[in-house]
Amino acid sequence: MDAAVLDWANLLLRWVHVIVGIAWIGSSFFFIWLDLSLNKREGLPDGVAGETWMVHGGGFYHAQKYLVAPEQLPEHLHWFKWESYATWISGFCLMAVIYYFGAESFLIDRQTLDVGPAAAIAISLAMLAVSWVVYDLICRSPLGNSTGPLAVAVFVLVVGAAFLFSNVFSGRAAFVHVGAMIGTIMSANVFFIIIPNQKKTVAAMLAGKAPDAVWGMQAKQRSTHNNYLTLPVLLMMISNHYPMTFGHEYNWLIVAVVLIIGGVVRDWFNTRNAGGGGSRTAWQWPLATVLTVGLAVFVSVPWNVETLDEEKMVDADGAFAIVQTHCVSCHATEPINPDFDAPPGGVVFESVDHLRTHAVRILAQTVTSQAMPLGNTSEMTELERQQIGAWIRAGQPD
């Protein structure tokens, strides 16, 4: 497919994905807040768990929640489902445009696993499907009755998948696939559990039967999971801009820490929304801060910097020769890489001065994170990365 067409498809799909994603996340955050903020009082109708009053946009709103269902269905009932479906569909299409049509550049890293585009795409699709099946089985198992063990099991599932992805795809694709996996689980929760259970409740009422309270409990459990997974999935989906995350040797461990940070932050909001305070909300932000600072140090400190022997050092011409060999297929005024019709980010490497101008970015993406060249299709060696890094750290001498 023409690179210009892919660029437009990328932009428009990304725009749609952000729009519908905001709608889905917004409704998720609102309804979890609403559920946790309910107050019980005398005189509420039978079956009402609580109510809350809100003010917004110059008006007052009064909401009540029925534990199972009201005695009679209202004439108009709004279903919150298309926000979820549209987010997943647009996200999957966006991933296909970037990582399936551009598999050689973005999906595959032959130094990680030497597979062709068709095999890599098949693995990607299979992993997304299997992740939902495994997650659903965990929730339906006895673990699903215990919040703590269930949370640990889901955590292990996601981190294990991240480790697997990092040993199959490029680092960039691995992180995006973690996000896609979580997004698939979240949307599948809506499609296979939450909405069907709500439809069962409506059908029972129309048939004059009492709805089973278990349907609502199952839907609420999955909705709560979605709420706690939201913050980590957002970071995964924007991670492609930050190679210090996906390009790290232990990127799966970064995923683990992000999951914990996101869960801890959401727990603070949810606890506060439920009226909690004091010691119950005193630990989340300090812990999240410590973990974030620790993560930043972990991914930023160059642990494996090696001192090169004098005879292996390169001057400006040597550094430029390495870049010419491995980088200019994309970073040229007229790229020869078919996935680009313009140099990515407007960055070109057609002179030593260009290298000096972008030295910090080269160090971050080619040496520290090894995110570039894309998929390492040019097979840049570890020695060449060290030579570029040593030249930059030495001040880019002539």
Image: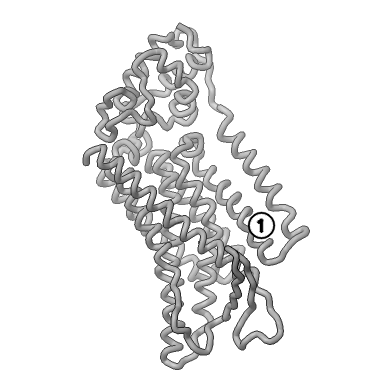
**Can you give x and y, in whole percent of width and height, for residue 296 in the image?**
60, 36
Place residue 203 in its image quadrant.
bottom left
Q: Label 1 neighbourhood size at 10 Å, few (<14), some (14-19), many (20+)?
A: some
Residue that sits furthest to the right in the current view: 278
Place residue 300 in its image quadrant.
top right
Q: Residue at x 27, y 43 (%)?
A: 101
Amino acid at circle 1: Trp
Q: Nearer the viewer, residue 39 or 291?
A: 39
- Residue 99 visible in the snapshot: no
Q: Residue at x 45, y 21 (%)?
A: 358
Could you tell me which secondary element the residue under label 1 belongs to? helix
Tell me the residue that label 1 is attached to: 268
Q: Nearer the viewer, residue 338 or 304?
A: 338
Q: How many marks?
A: 1
**Can you give x and y, in whole percent of width and height, for residue 6 in the image?**
28, 42
Q: Residue at x 50, y 34 (%)?
A: 244
Residue that sits furthest to the bottom in the current view: 208
**Can you give x and y, in whole percent of width and height, for residue 55 in the image?**
62, 67
Residue 158 as seen in the image, left or right of residue 285 = left
Q: Residue at x 56, y 47 (%)?
A: 258
Q: Does residue 359 sit above or below 108 in this rendering?
A: above
**Can you give x and y, in whole percent of width and height, for residue 364 in the image?**
49, 27
